[in-house]
């Protein structure tokens, strides 16, 4: 093919005989296009190179990296949670269950009442797992984790239906498989009135979506009529081996009905369902009725079909099993107005014939939670099945979700918008600093672009719109210079404006990270062995700290597991409970005497075993509170709290938390933020043996928490305290100036005196030493070891983990997930004769093999005998725990 030779400086090119012939116009045009296209590519390449290496692009890219780094740090700080304990608080790492789903995170709760209109959640009825249970059961009782832990990965459970056989309850529900993303029918069994459930497995699994498993009995046979609208028909299954084996009995209706049920009324069988496939049908606002002489059909449509074809908020779509109360029939519908499945609504059926149907709405009497996403049903609840038991009581199951429908998509849109806003902030900063020149080429604003001849310019002048656009672009190009001239970045005022804009960018970046990585924003409770519970929050205060109390009640009442707040009012005129913005009941207990001993006063009105003693000037996240509660449920005989102290020295001296952290151990937990067993703690504190200690507390007006630690230590030879590391803590008393202990030195001196006095009475606790949990150890110790770079973690850390019998996710990540590496290193050190326990510990100490001998031989710290001698006051066993020294904690 010929080659066209272009001229220089825009002159006409020439062509040889072997190139483009002038007579071949089309060939010449093609060659010209090829050359011009080549030239344009070179120009674009040059512009791209100049753009990449320009100061504006460097500024833009650098600031995006800076904001991105801030966002990553924020995500690590707030959402990585390396301190989370390795409990069954959530589905295991290997389980694919409980994945975030656009349809929601539905779970199931149990309710009781004397009637269908007086239903209370299981926690309000104070149901216990058994007589020796350590905590009352709380909703939800079945979650995606329940099924996933049983080996059936699920994203959510919903649409519950009960089937009662004597004292045994069977629960059928929809479960969305995490593997197939399809709805199946699961089943569980309970023999304790719904307090606990044994997951039996998947009862029905088809090639299409299944939900709404309406189960009923007819002529001694058990039938299930699940929704199978994707199949385009309503199918009826019969149990071959109840409850796990079913077979298709027949197809009832060749219509894709959703959420259908059958009921016997006035000698006829009535089928209620919604068909959303028709033209002009309003989704979630349509209802049809069919009737027959048998639940097996044939079915005939009601004369007034569709009964409803209205707005989706009316409650036309069914929301559970209908029920009969006092001879009246009630239908359960779901309100889908604000979001899908927002709430259930109850309708009393007044007329039900082949020719007519009439119903009126009646109140359910159900109190919605005000805890928002922290409540398992805080956003919506759309299904209810209520039945009467043989005892005459009523039991109900209801599903609930903490977030509205489509929450992941909503958060993705908001997060993307936040990141886009960060880009705009970077551009604004670059323009104000002169690093980015934001100019709009005027040819972009013209009516047309390209070469302009006189005729073209004449047409453009006549185009008023094009002229106005060009003028607007010209003025817009002058805006950056004008703004920069007014702000003057070199002045203090200009720098303040730049700082504010930068801070706005940081806030937008953190907001975007929160939407993307922060989940649904819920601070959920942590289950233990698949069950949830609740606790009572107790604080002690007086009139000068009312502002603290109001903020305290507003914040903590929205924590998921808080059942009640008890305010011990020591001095002044108490407020009314209505003065506090609380989502849970607040009870103000006015005391006659201003005493710190009132904190542990016996209170028979407290209905939970767990009590969180929390000062009104301490603010921490609900997630930390829930985490601490989960740890206490594993060790209800201990004081589980967030403020550790290490008591040691000669003489004994009270020190702050930094001292305990520095020595990687503790033997005391302050009860200003701690979980206790109300029966165990209050009885010990008000026993006759503790009278001398209470008198010292009144005389010092201090040390009530120190006294409780001594009473616990004196009553048990095992570990009596447990530390949980919080994410963050804020002391609000610093903002109000009403702190009880304003002078730290005086406060610590008084507490040191208390240590000496209590040691004389109850024996010293200085010989005790407990180590942080596995995760706290990893975060607190291994990270610091890594910072030293040249040092690697000694294998003594493995010894601690073996001793605690826990697995540390942080340590797994630190060692690349290879725990075997630790064992290999440990073995090799032993073979080489290296002392793996540390230079100060030649081997297992004598105290490990001869604890009684160690007690007598232990050194005296100058504050009473380390062991509990017979001359001391005892609240319990006298054998204290012997903890061997660990080289990692020295």
Image: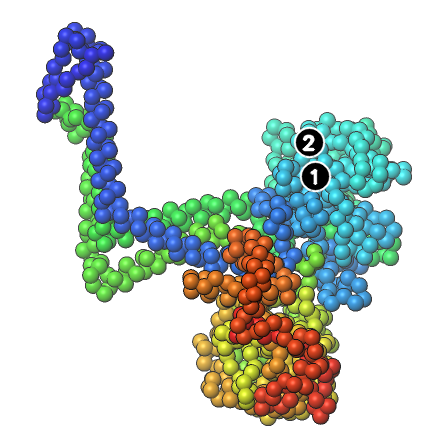
Q: Residue at x 84, y 38 (%)?
A: 241
Q: Which mark is residue 184?
A: 1
Residue 744 x, y percent position in the rendering = 47, 84
- Give the alpha-carbon distance from disc 2 to disc 1, as whole Å: 9 Å
Q: Residue at x 65, y 83 (%)?
A: 710
Q: Which mark is residue 207?
A: 2
Mark 1: secondary structure: strand
The quarter holding residue 155 reads: top right
199 with respect to 7 (left or right): right
Give the residue at the far top of this rendering. Answer: 23
Q: Residue at x 38, y 46 (%)?
A: 420
Seen in the picture, residue 211 relative to 481 is either above or below; the reply is above
The N terminus: image quadrant: top left
Looking at the image, tell me whether mark 2 or mark 1 is earlier in sequence order: 1
Residue 518 x, y percent position in the rendering = 50, 53
121 with respect to 767 (left or right): right
State the residue in front, 708 or 583.
708
State the residue in front, 116 or 856.
856
């Amino acid at each position: 093919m010929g080659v066209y030779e272009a001229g220089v400086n825009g002159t006409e090119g020439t062509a040889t005989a072997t190139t483009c012939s002038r007579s071949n116009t089309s060939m010449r045009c093609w060659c010209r296009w090829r050359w011009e296209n080549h030239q344009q590519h070179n120009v674009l390449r040059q512009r791209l190179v100049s753009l990449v290496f320009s100061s504006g692009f460097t500024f833009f890219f650098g600031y995006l990296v800076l904001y991105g780094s801030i966002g990553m740090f924020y995500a690590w700080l707030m959402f990585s949670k390396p301190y989370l304990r390795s409990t069954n608080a959530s589905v295991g790492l290997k389980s694919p269950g409980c994945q975030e789903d656009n349809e929601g995170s539905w779970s199931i709760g149990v309710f009781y009442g004397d009637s269908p209109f007086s239903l209370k959640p299981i926690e309000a009825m104070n149901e216990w797992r058994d007589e020796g249970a350590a905590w009352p059961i709380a909703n939800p009782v079945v979650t995606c984790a329940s099924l996933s832990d049983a080996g059936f990965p699920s994203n959510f459970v919903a649409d519950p239906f009960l089937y009662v056989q004597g004292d045994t309850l069977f629960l059928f529900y929809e479960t969305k498989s995490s593997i197939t993303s399809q709805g199946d029918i699961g089943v569980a069994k309970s023999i304790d009135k719904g307090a606990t459930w044994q997951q039996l497995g998947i009862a029905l699994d088809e090639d299409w979506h299944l939900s709404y498993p309406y189960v009923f009995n007819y002529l001694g046979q058990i039938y299930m009529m699940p929704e199978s609208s994707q199949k385009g028909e309503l199918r009826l299954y019969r149990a071959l081996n109840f409850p796990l084996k079913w077979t298709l009995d027949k197809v009832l209706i060749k219509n894709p009905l959703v959420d259908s049920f059958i009921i016997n009324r006035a000698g006829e069988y009535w089928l209620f369902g919604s068909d959303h496939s028709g033209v002009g049908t309003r989704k979630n606002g349509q209802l049809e009725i069919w009737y027959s002489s048998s639940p097996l059909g044939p079915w005939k449509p009601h004369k007034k079909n569709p009964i409803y074809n209205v707005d989706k908020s009316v409650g036309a779509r069914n929301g559970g099993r209908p029920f009969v109360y006092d001879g009246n029939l009630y239908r359960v519908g779901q309100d889908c107005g604000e979001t899908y499945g927002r709430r259930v609504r109850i309708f009393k059926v007044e007329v039900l014939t082949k020719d007519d149907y009439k119903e009126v709405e009646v109140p359910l009497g159900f109190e919605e939670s005000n805890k928002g996403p922290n409540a398992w049903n805080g956003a919506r609840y759309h299904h209810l099945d209520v039945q009467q038991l043989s005892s005459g009581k009523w039991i109900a199951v209801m599903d609930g979700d903490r977030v509205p429908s489509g929450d992941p998509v909503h958060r993705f849109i908001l997060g993307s918008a936040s990141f886009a806003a960060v880009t705009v902030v970077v551009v604004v900063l670059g323009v104000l600093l002169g690093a980015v020149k934001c100019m709009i080429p005027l040819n972009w604003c013209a009516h047309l672009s390209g070469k302009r001849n006189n005729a073209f310019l004449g047409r453009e002048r006549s185009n008023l719109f094009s002229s106005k656009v060009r003028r607007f672009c010209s003025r817009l190009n002058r805006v950056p210079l004008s703004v920069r001239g007014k702000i003057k970045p070199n002045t203090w005022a200009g720098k303040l404006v730049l700082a504010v804009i930068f801070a706005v960018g940081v806030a937008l970046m953190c907001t975007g990270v929160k939407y993307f990585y922060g989940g649904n924003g819920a601070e959920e409770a942590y289950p233990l062995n698949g069950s949830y519970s609740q606790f009572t929050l107790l604080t002690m205060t007086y009139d000068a700290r009312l502002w603290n109390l109001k903020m305290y009640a507003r914040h903590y009442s929205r924590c998921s597991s808080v059942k009640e707040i008890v305010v011990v009012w020591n001095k002044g005129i108490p407020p009314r409970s209505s003065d506090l913005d609380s989502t849970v009941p607040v009870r103000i207990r006015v005391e006659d005497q201003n005493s710190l001993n009132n904190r542990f006063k016996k209170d028979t009105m407290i209905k939970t075993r767990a009590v969180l003693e929390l000062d009104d000037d301490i603010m921490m996240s609900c997630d930390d509170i829930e985490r601490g509660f989960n740890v206490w449920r594993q060790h209800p005989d201990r004081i589980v709290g967030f403020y550790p102290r290490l008591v040691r020295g000669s003489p004994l001296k009270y020190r702050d938390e930094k001292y305990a952290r520095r020595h990687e151990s503790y033997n005391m937990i302050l009860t200003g933020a701690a979980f206790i067993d109300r029966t165990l703690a209050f009885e010990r504190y008000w026993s006759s043996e503790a009278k001398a200690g209470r008198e010292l507390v009144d005389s010092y007006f201090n040390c009530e928490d120190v006294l409780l630690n001594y009473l616990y230590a004196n009553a048990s030879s095992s570990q009596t305290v447990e530390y949980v590391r919080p994410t963050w803590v804020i002391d609000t008393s610093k903002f109000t100036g009403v702190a009880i202990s304003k002078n730290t030195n005086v406060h610590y001196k008084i507490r040191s005196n208390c240590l000496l006095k209590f040691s004389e009475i109850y024996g010293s606790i200085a010989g005790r030493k407990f180590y942080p949990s596995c995760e706290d150890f990893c975060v607190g110790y291994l990270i610091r070891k890594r910072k030293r770079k040249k040092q690697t973690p000694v294998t003594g850390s493995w010894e601690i983990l073996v001793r605690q019998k826990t697995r540390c996710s942080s340590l797994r990540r630190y060692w690349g997930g290879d725990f075997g590496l630790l064992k290999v290193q440990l073995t090799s050190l032993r073979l080489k004769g290296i002392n793996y326990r540390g230079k100060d510990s030649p081997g297992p100490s004598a105290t490990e093999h001869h604890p009684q001998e160690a007690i007598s031989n232990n050194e005296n710290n100058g504050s009473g005998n380390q062991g509990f001698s017979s001359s001391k006051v005892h609240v319990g066993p006298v054998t204290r725990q012997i903890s061997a020294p660990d080289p990692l904690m020295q």
